[in-house]
Amino acid sequence: MIKATLEVFADSIGGGDSPATFSPSRIKTEILSGLTVALALVPEAVAFALVAGVHPLVGLYAAFMVGLITALFGGRPGMISGATGALAVVMVALVAEHGVEYLFATVVLMGLLQILAGIFHLGKFIRLVPHPVMLGFVNGLAIVIFLAQLTQFQIEAPDGVRDWMAGWQLVTMLALVVLTMAIIWVMPKITSVIPAPLAGIAIVVAIVLVFGIDVPRVGDLASIQGGLPDFHLPLVPLTFETLRIILPYALILAAIGLIESLLTLNLVSEITHETGGASKECIAQGVSNTVTGFFGGMGGCAMIGQSMINMKSGGRTRLSGISAALFLLAFILFASNLIEQIPLAALVGVMFMVVLGTFAWQSITVLRRIPLTDALVMILVTIVTVASDLAIAVVVGVIVSALAYAWNNATRIHARSEITEDGAKVYRIEGPLFFGSTEGFAAFFDPQGDPTTVIVDFLESRVVDQSALQAIEALASKYEAAGKALQLRHLSQDCHKLLNRAGQLMVDSYDDPHYGVAVDYNIKTGILGGGH
């Protein structure tokens, strides 16, 4: 019984690892990786809470609860979730205008929407994100992470204005950042006993404390000391007016959170060589945000930077994410004084290494070898990610890619014509017939100059949507008005049912294709409706 229980526990935290492979060495690696991630989470959570205009503990509680729940039930072991800047910038206006309690209510609704997205398997649509968009997202996010670290090179003057460091203070800060990065780069060549980022943080902390170097510390951002989060219902009126206020924010936050989480899931999947889990991740994100809203947290989603730190430190199972969340809670409850002494330079050095590892450097070298459209999409997504936010960047990239694909297919339609022995003219259509190619399709024909019998062969074509059906109907009407016979060959049975005027012109054949057409059709009226 005890053995069976241990096997189930090991499988749950290991994402499929059995006790045989979940060895003491693996446990040590996972826990140390979680500790490294937790140390990097502290300044991020505090900074994002300040961006959103809420108390730092609101960000820390979110990082703990979202991180723990998604680590336990998320779609990919090794992913790290917490409070993120992409969500924080959306929350600013809500908090400023209505207060933090409305934020908590919004986070609860955001979570419920994400749960529904998981139940209805909407996460599968992430497969529609093209590879150039993924590369642009990765590059843009790396730049965003880099720019976010630059604020640590600023100090607050007595008058409250923040200004850039200068003189020896700047030199000292840069030296410690470079030292941290050097340790992270060298450590794997020496030993893998301790994760390189953790070794970098520990050594720099020791140097700063032993030599009493005066540099900004985590405690300079804000105090992280606190207690356990308390359950409470958001103090907002249960009215339609409240729903009118929070619903738009909840929709935007849910969309941004799921897009960032699912794209991070894809990136982690490339490292761990695992597939699937999109719907499971949506539900886990939703549950975590719903719970967080009831415990005074600002909500969150997957974090690519911390996920990459976890991967780089050797974290591959659920234990690393669970450890990170529990370490973060321990920092809040028991070790705030120690954590507040960590120099920001060490954490900046870790994040700079994440930037170097996250940016898809090979995308620069392939820009000249890939199609121009793909290159432009990659650059566009990168720019929009930096200038605006991730969700808008991905949507813009998908739309531009879809339009480019439609245009390319619109130019692929061709027609070959020939005259048969009995004097009939045959048009052999090649390429897809859809809304983008209907104009080119109509230009192939000459109803006035063609012979009395015309055959249109769709064997090497495919009718895709309602616009294509309307183009065929219009063509049939033109030949009918000219008093000429038109035959339509090699159209699917679906086309036969959906075509109204031209349906009787079809010629059945044993090699007719079988496919569906993306339209609505009212059987009673025979009227074509809008496409799906």
Image (cartoon, grey):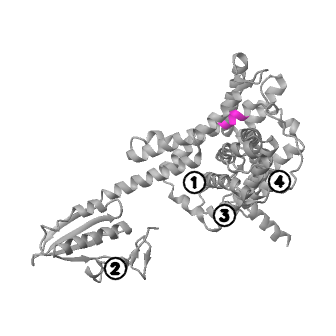
Q: Please tell me how crowded label 4 is: few (under 14), some (14-19), or many (20+) other residues with Cα within 10 Å.
A: few
The residue lying toward the viewer, choosing from 202 and 102, is 102
* Residue type at the position of mark 3: Lys
Boundaries of the magenta span? 347-351
The residue lying toward the viewer, choosing from 525 and 487, is 525
- For numbered disc 4, what is the local secondary structure? loop
Would residue 464 be seen by someone viewing this image from the given angle? no
Would residue 425 be seen by someone viewing this image from the given angle? yes
Query: Where's residue 424, x and y in %?
Result: 13, 75
Q: CA distance from mark 1 to mark 3?
A: 18 Å
Residue on which disc 2 sits: 496
* Residue type at the position of mark 2: His
Residue on which disc 3 sits: 280
Instruction: Give the residue drawn at x 17%, y 65%.
Output: 446
Q: CA distance from mark 1 to mark 4?
A: 43 Å
- Rendered-image quadrant of the N terminus: bottom right
Query: Where's residue 431, x and y in %?
Result: 30, 64
410 to 138, vertically: above or below: below
If you read the primary sequence from the N terminus, does the residue marked by circle 1 or circle 4 appear first? Answer: 4
Q: CA distance from mark 2 to mark 1?
A: 44 Å
Q: CA distance from mark 3 to mark 4?
A: 31 Å
Q: CA distance from mark 2 to mark 4?
A: 60 Å
Residue on which disc 1 sits: 270
If you read the primary sequence from the N terminus, does the residue marked by circle 2 or circle 3 appear first? Answer: 3
Q: Please tell me how crowded label 3 is: few (under 14), some (14-19), or many (20+) other residues with Cα within 10 Å.
A: many
* Residue type at the position of mark 1: Glu
Residue on which disc 4 sits: 235
Q: Are marks 3 and 4 in contact (CB under 8 Å)?
A: no
